[in-house]
Amino acid sequence: MNKYEYNISSENSPEKFKTICSKIEETYSELQKDVLLVDVDGTTIQVYHINKLEITVYDDDYYVVTGVGVEKMIGYTNIDTEKGFAFLQKYLREKGIIAALEEKGIEEGDTVKIYDLEFDYYK
């Protein structure tokens, strides 16, 4: 997986991006923060590491989650079935991934990418 894949959006909000990143940093004391990146198209990217997860926040309401446990889960779950999708939702909630995204400011309609799986967040 290329961890630098992203969507380009013309509706970036620097204020919202700063608010999301501040919320992340205030919530997790054990958080490791990488250097803030600005891509050639002007997209601002902030990468965080917590435990074995990596959460990348883009300034266009796009979140990427990576990590060993998440990668294994995505690899052996068939989310095209109702049972598989329910299992994935349960896993994301039990592992605190949904809570972490919510604490980081994710809103309904924001895009989440976990390896090859991409979905819009809705409660």
Image (cartoon, grey):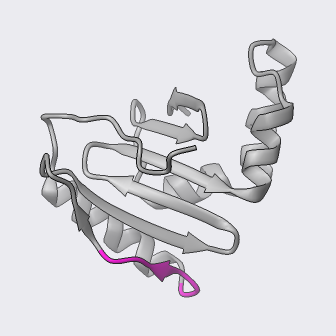
Coordinates of residue 43 in the picture (x, y in percent): 20, 51
Residue at x 44%, y 57% (from the top left corner): 56
Residue at far bottom of view:
29
Quarter residue 111 falls in: top left
Specify the quadrant that holds the C terminus: top right
Give the left or right position of residue 21, taking residue 83 as reference: left
Is residue 95 at least partly visible in the picture?
no
Specify the quadrant that holds the N terminus: top right
Coordinates of residue 96 in the picture (x, y in percent): 70, 57
- 19 in relation to 76, above or below: below
Q: Magenta span has 69?
A: no
Instruction: Give the total number of marks visible in the rendering.
Output: 0
Coordinates of residue 23 in the picture (x, y in percent): 38, 70
Residue at far top of view:
81
Coordinates of residue 40 in the picture (x, y in percent): 14, 51
Q: Which residues are magenta?
A: 29-35
Residue at x 81%, y 42% (from the top left corner): 73
- 48 in relation to 44, above or below: below
Residue at x 14%, y 57% (from the top left corner): 14
Give the left or right position of residue 63, taking residue 50 as reference: left
Which residue is more in the foreground, 20 or 115?
115
- 70 in relation to 76, above or below: below
Quarter residue 30 falls in: bottom right
Is residue 4 at least partly visible in the picture?
yes
- The prevailing secondary structure element of the residues shown in magenta is loop
Residue at x 37%, y 43% (from the top left corner): 62
